[in-house]
Amino acid sequence: MARKHKPASRRSVLKRGGLALGVGMGLAGCMGGNGDGSGDGGGDSDGDSGGATTSSGGGGEELDITFATTQPPENISVQTAQEHFIDVIEEETDGRISVNLEAATLGGTEDNLDAIEAGTVDILHESPTALSQRFSSEYSFAGDPFVIEDMEHYRAVNEEFLMPEDGLNGILMENGIQLGPAFYVGNRCFTSNKPVTSPEDVQGLKLRLPQYETWTAVWDEIGADVTPVAYDELYSALQTGVVDASEGPISQFLSVSLYEVQSHFSVTNHLLDTKHFLYNSEFFDGLSDEDRELITSTASDAVEAMTEDIKAEEESLYEQAREEDTTVVTADEVDRDAFVEAGQPALDELSETNWAVDIADIQDLA
């Protein structure tokens, strides 16, 4: 059962008076979003659906929807969203609904979350980690190490603890955002100069982590020597021995050329990266019943297809790593259960002191 969460403090939101300008610029409507880490939103303050203009034909209002993501257009998640959500919406409505994609054009995560709260974005992709950091740290478990096993487990956790109005979704709704379905982004794994298959292999290794206290607590418990290093210094830190190991998705391993300074990529799958569809509440509430059903059902179908496509892309990235002479230690070779057991005291402590949900209740859904 989810524990009763503390009320989240509302962030100040940009004045909605600028929304009319947003319509003229193709920014009519709103959107919102967290990692791997969504909701339903509503129309503008004048009651129009996402700044929509009324059409005399086409079966309903013409809608210009602004859809944002922090990822660039060439990112696989953006490409699959274009194919399975944006193109489908526009084709199903013969162009009556048009979607303006803002891919890596509005700034970073906080900028995009500002935009969906303000209503200058209608739909956003964001991770549960970003959402918990901004709105309620009690829900960080959705993006913490060795908590979620796989996508099926995440969907169960989402349904039980995130989507209900007494869960994360309720906190988001207080901030003008509604949580929608989630799709797979990737898995964070372990890079080093030796195989990592069990907790014994990481004892005393200087491990670079992003500076999230919950991540540090779990890896400290397992036995790694967590060492803070800025992301833009990661390559040189591994090259010079400031740190021995790092963690992250295979896409990061390749894009930063870590194969030049790390010989092994061990598929520990210790943290499932996901992102949610998020909707600005005014945009969402201002939609007609038919358009709301079209958008939500298309999003639900899209996350399934996007997950399949992204997983297929991930397999090809493992092959690219092998071509760079990286030894890929497969998930079958990793004793993930042993890692979970080693980190369990920290997970239990976080459950008691940080999270809105008992770790046992989360693990029971696996």
Image (tube, rainbow, N blue to C red):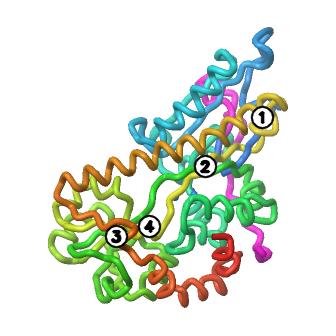
Give the residue type that dot 1 points to. Arg
Badge number at residue 76: none
Residue situated in front as seen by the camera: 28 or 339: 339
Q: Is residue 35 visible?
A: no
**For numbered disc 3, what is the local secondary structure?**
strand
Residue on which the image places disc 2? 114
Label 4 to label 1: alpha-carbon separation? 35 Å
**For numbered disc 2, what is the local secondary structure?**
helix
Residue on which the image places disc 4? 269
**Image location of residue 70, percent across then percent down:** 48, 46
In the image, which residues are magenta?
Answer: 1-30
Instruction: Tell me which label, 3 or 4, sits earlier in the chain.
Output: 3
Label 2 to label 3: alpha-carbon separation? 33 Å
Instruction: Tell me which label, 4 or 1, sits earlier in the chain.
Output: 4
Residue on which the image places disc 3? 190
Residue on which the image places disc 1? 292
Residue situated in front as seen by the camera: 236 or 268: 268
